[in-house]
Amino acid sequence: MNKIVKLTNALLVLLLMMAETPVLAQKSSLSQSSVSQPSVKPSRIWSELATGYTSAQMIKVEKVLFYSDRTEIGMHIDNSPGARIEIAPETYLQAADKQYKVKSATMLKLGEPFTIPEDGQVDFALTFDALPDSVNTISIRQPNGWTIFNIHSTDYTPSGLENTYWRDQASGEWCIGFTSHSVIYDQKAWAIDRRTDKKDRYEFLLIDPSSQQKKMVQVDKLKKGLRTITVKGERTMTCSPITTAFLPDYPMKDTRKGFLNTGYQEGDSVTITGWLKDMPEMAWRRGKNFEVRFTNIFTDEEENAYAKMDSLGRFSLKIPMLNSSQVFMDWGRTTVSTVLEPGESYYFLHDFHSGQKLFMGKNSRVQNELLSFPYAWNTISADGRTDAMTYLTQMDSVRKSNVKQLQTTLIAHPNLSERFVEYTAGFYQVLQAMYMMQAKFAYKGQLPLSYMEYVGNELWKSFPQPVTLYSLFSTFSRDYIDQLTSGRANNNSLKSVLLRLDRKKVISLKEDDRNLLNQYEKSTSELRGNIQKAKDNEERQGLVKAFNEGKLVSDIGKLAGKYMSFIVKEVSLATQEQLTSVCDSIGCNPSLRSILLARHFTRSIDRSRQPLDSVSLAFVEKEIQLPAALHSVNNLNDKYLSLQKGDLEGAASLRPSSDVEGMSDGEKILRKILEPYQGRLVYLDVWGTWCSPCKKALSESHVLKEALKDFDIVYLYLANRSDDKSWKNVIKEYQLTGDHCIHYNLPADQQSAIEHYLNIHSFPTYKLIDKKGNIHDLDWRHADNMNRFKQQVEQLSK
């Protein structure tokens, strides 16, 4: 049995280690919680619930039953099969100012571990003492830890106006909201300049703080759950209160289809105004900016747009947007993913006290429906244990099941818009496409022709447009194109490329070089065969490790390093020709063809951190016809062209390889480099310009240096197989110079010798060298826990 770790500051202790034998448990229903209790009907039942802010998304409160002698809360956990959970006995329910400690639980025992069953679902109930009849909101808490705030029934009608939101009965849209100091209307938070109350009738004089525009709003008294609300000079509405977490069903069907497709034009934008209202302190700790994340279709990179919130959590943000796109709106606090269309304006409210999330805007219906009925992430990851065609059949069944569930939802909610149905059904297609191409890793790239034909005919050709509607397009298209490219004749092996360069007289290979290439080709082929025969993963890893530590790999690394800049250009040209051929063969329209080509070249620039060569630039200008795609490549290219031409400040940080000229022993080379820094701590970073994780870490290295500014540390950077121009560009880009920064870009044989001495086989690799010259290993993610790392540095500084 795995060791159980108990976290006393959390309601649930979630252990990610899988149990050796998962416990299979029957789902409990709330009625099971009363087995030991007298058979008495509850005096009240909350079955339709809303909750405020929660710090644990995997648990939901589904029902609250009030008895004369107890209170029962039905809960549901959706978590990874085999994960371990534990309900802490310190858990308590808070109602008004009083705390009620948990007394018992069904399905699991308080303070004891429970294993999540194979379906990942657990239903259970917690029992507390009886609550007063006057209670209308409760919270569940663990001291100094996990909390679900403001659990309440949606089956009520608010008596006043403060902190209420109202929908137009005719259109079904959220039209107005009232808070203590402002009124939300017409996608703005208007300040209340004057308010009068007369027997449940209200009149507000509102003022827009930015434009000083004024509006008069009159609210009639509540009659049969409805109010007449008049905005003078504009409209009169019959309104009902929104008591549910999301907007209720619209009264009429919206038969519009499709999303705006601009053709990926530059200059379009989306405006999001909103309010993260009544955020608790733990939510504010995530920062004072409202963040929207989306994928840049040309660079395949995630981008972020930010707006500073005021002290109440209000914000306004204008985001450049090429086309209708999926976005993630301050995901860490709201967990809202939606689709936005260029040219539109939206008002987004997340009331952390009531738990309500609402969109306001002329075209905000599908956004509200996606909140009310989020698509399911039901899928199956390929594990390679079944054949690929069986996996295809399984994924087909999963998609059909998801679509069937969508149809069931439509029967229960017939007024859901056509655009909601279209977007949700499209997501299930995209989800299947992405997972089916991710399967290439489980099947080691060996996907049958019929499998790939299915992906092409059923998923690629009918992919929803525009492709920016789903962020998963980037992963799917990258894997799909890479698989098609790799399935063609591969002339980009190291041997093929070097021999091709030799024939073109770009380089001159010696006979020993040719023999080395032949030996490497033969040895790698034998290695692949041995890996296939290996009994388990441990044996496979051992074979690879032994191969990488051998002299052959060291020698081939030196040869490749010698001609690396030529290799990169030759492979790039061959890849360009292959990519255009693949794009044409799968029927890409001009826009999609331009997107895929732009992504290839921006990734190439990012990998090399150099501007494109003249041949590639000419290819870009000729083949990329979409203006926005062409601008994306040219802008990134210009950035590195400018960087390359610019002066390198702190050039003294770049040490010449002549410091260790003529040396070949890895340990002696390293000790020679370290000589000037004896008696000081040295932070060693072994990286490469070709290594994306390395560059990502370097871009954030200023955070580490700031945290360690009180220590006397030398930062030593050794570059692996890095082109000199790329090396200098990265150093310039991230400003990695200064009195405490030292850089070497040694010849391949010397760098390889150091790496062999340090037993380095992955990048980046970090070491900490103490004042006595002892070398200490560092986990490559050591900076994630800065407090622990600082303690280690402090210990070695003594």
Image (spheres, grey):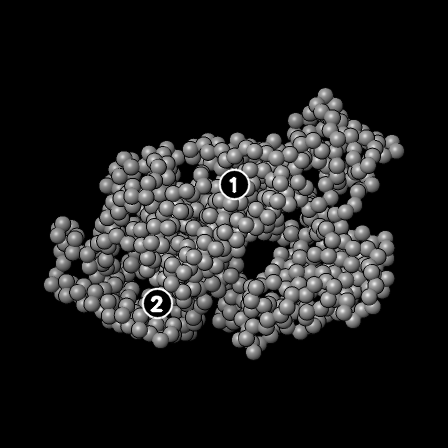
Q: Quadrant of the N terminus?
A: bottom right
Q: Is residue 643 visible?
A: no
Task: Tell me the residue that label 1 is attached to.
Answer: 422
Determine which residue is flagged by label 2: 761
Residue situated in front as seen by the camera: 249 or 513: 249
Foreground residue among 709 and 429: 429
Q: What percent of the width, then of the height, locates residue 52?
A: 70, 51
Q: Position of residue 529 (x, y in %)?
A: 27, 70
Q: Is residue 532 above or below residue 704?
A: below
What is the distance, in whole Å, between disc 1 and disc 2 at their CAs? 48 Å
Q: Position of residue 457 (x, y in %)?
A: 37, 46
Residue 324 lies, in percent from the top left, at: 49, 37
Between 574 and 376, the residue placed more toward the observer is 376
**Dot 1 amino acid type:** Glu
Quarter of the image holding residue 744?
Answer: bottom left
Asked whether, in this view, residue 296 is left or right of residue 791, the answer is left
Q: Is 666 situated above or below 55?
A: below
Frontmost of labels 1 and 2 is 1
In primary-sequence order, the first of circles 1 and 2 is: 1
Determine whether 564 is above or below 424 in the image: below
Name the residue at the top extreme: 233
Q: Residue at x 80, y 62 (%)?
A: 71
**Amino acid on which disc 2 is placed:** His
Residue at horizontal 59 percent and vertical 48 percent from the top: 408
Q: Quadrant of residue 193?
A: top right
Indicate which disc residue 41 carries: none
What residue appears at the point 29 percent right and 64 percent down from the top-left corner?
Answer: 751
Crowding at label 1, few (<14), some or many (≥20) Cα neighbours within 10 Å?
some
